[in-house]
Image: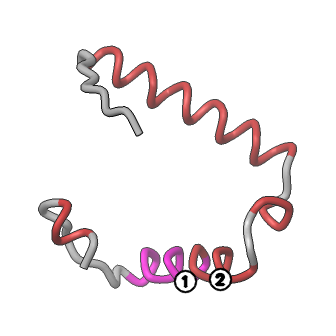
Amino acid sequence: MNTRTLEISNDELAEVTRAYQVLQKFLDRVISPNEIYTEEFIAGLNEADEQLLEREYSEVRDFAHFVK
């Protein structure tokens, strides 16, 4: 696999994020999550939503902390 370094400005990052959000909203409208995700993945998403609602989360400070 080839590796590339990509540098983008804050404005470009904001544009990419907006584009992602537009695509996400579109896909949410036209494709059911059941068509693209496994039941196990959907259960994990639902659990994460519940944890957010109940404020059961901790701050991630770096990638190493994230993957624990």
Question: Residue 43 bears which disc, if any?
Answer: 2
Q: Is residue 22 above or below residue 9?
A: below
Looking at the rendered structure, the number of numbered marks drawn on it comes to: 2
64 sits to left or right of 19:
left
Question: Residue 5 bears which disc, if any?
Answer: none
In reply to whether residue 53 is colored magenta, the answer given is yes
Within-10-Å neighbours for mark 2: few <14, some 14–19, many 20+: few
The residue where tag 1 is placed is 47
Quadrant location, the C terminus? bottom left
Residue 31 pos. (x, y %): 85, 50
Marks 1/2 in contact by CB < 8 Å: the verdict is: yes
The kind of residue on which mark 2 rests is: Ala
Residue 61 pos. (x, y %): 12, 63
Which residue is located at x 35 percent, y 80 percent?
55
Which residue is located at x 54 percent, y 83 percent?
47
Which residue is located at x 57 percent, y 80 percent?
44
In reply to whether residue 37 is colored magenta, the answer given is no
